[in-house]
């Protein structure tokens, strides 16, 4: 994956934005992962909850962020949201091969670790 310097050239403001975005994304993901573990929620269900939260947050932002909110204005803003989401999905699809490669590597490492732990327990029963 390209680093922020590759994406934004020599624009320090954009590099700072990318670093801040990454920091927030990682922090939110960490909190969500902790919650998912504690509540025993799987990733697919959490994705649905997050989509619902995203839409409701966008609707709230529109309602509070414009001087005179309207049904038509909200619908237009939700159309803009759909376009933004479509762009994120397009970008994710472009990186699908690289992502699946990372997933396969991580799964292989986890399987190897579990196998090694199992062998160790068999060799040293308590």
Image (tube, rainbow, N blue to C red):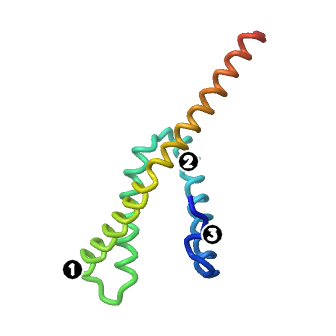
Sequence-earlier tag: 2 or 1 = 2
Quadrant housing the C terminus: top right
> At numbered mark 1, what does the secondary structure look like: helix, strand or loop?
helix
Is residue 19 shown left or right of residue 84?
right
Residue 70 percent coordinates (x, y): 25, 82
The residue under label 3 is: 19
**Residue at numbered disc 1:** 72
Residue at the spot x=41%, y=50% of the render? 47
Secondary structure at numbered mark 3: helix
Residue 33: give its label: 2
> Residue 27: x, y in percent?
61, 59
Q: Nearer the viewer, mark 3 or mark 2?
A: 3
Are there few (<14), some (14-19), or many (20+) residues within 10 Å of tag 2?
some
Front in this rendered view, residue 120 or 69? 120
In the displayed structure, would residue 96 be above or below residue 111?
below
- Disc count in the image? 3
Q: Is residue 19 left or right of residue 36?
A: right
In which quadrant will I find the N terminus? bottom right
Residue at screen point 55% across, 44% down: 102
**Labels 3 and 1: the sequence-earlier one:** 3
- What is the CA distance from the residue labelled 3 to the residue labelled 1? 35 Å
Mark 2 to mark 1 CA distance (whole Å): 37 Å
Q: Residue at x 59, y 77 (%)?
A: 9
Q: Are marks 2 and 1 in contact (CB under 8 Å)?
A: no
Which image quadrant for residue 55? bottom left
The image shows residue 94 at horizontal and vertical percentages of 42, 56
Residue that appears at 59% across and 70% down: 6
Do the CB atoms of the residues marked 3 and 1 lie less than 8 Å apart? no
Answer few, some or many: residues within 10 Å of disc 3's Cα (few below 14, many 20 plus, some between 14 and 19): some
**Which circle, 3 or 1, is nearer the viewer?**
3
Which image quarter: residue 45?
top left
């Amino acid at each position: 994956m390209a680093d922020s310097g590759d994406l934004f050239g020599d624009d320090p403001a954009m590099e700072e934005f990318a670093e801040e975005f990454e920091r927030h994304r990682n922090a939110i993901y960490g909190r969500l992962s902790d919650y998912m573990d504690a509540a025993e929620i799987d990733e697919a269900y959490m994705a649905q909850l997050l989509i619902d939260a995203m839409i409701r947050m966008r609707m709230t932002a529109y309602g509070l962020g414009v001087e005179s909110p309207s049904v038509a204005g909200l619908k237009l803003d939700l159309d803009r949201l759909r376009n933004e989401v479509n762009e994120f999905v397009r970008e994710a699809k472009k990186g699908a091969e690289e992502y699946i490669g990372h997933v396969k590597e991580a799964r292989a490492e986890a399987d190897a670790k579990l196998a090694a732990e199992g062998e160790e327990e068999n060799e040293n029963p308590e």
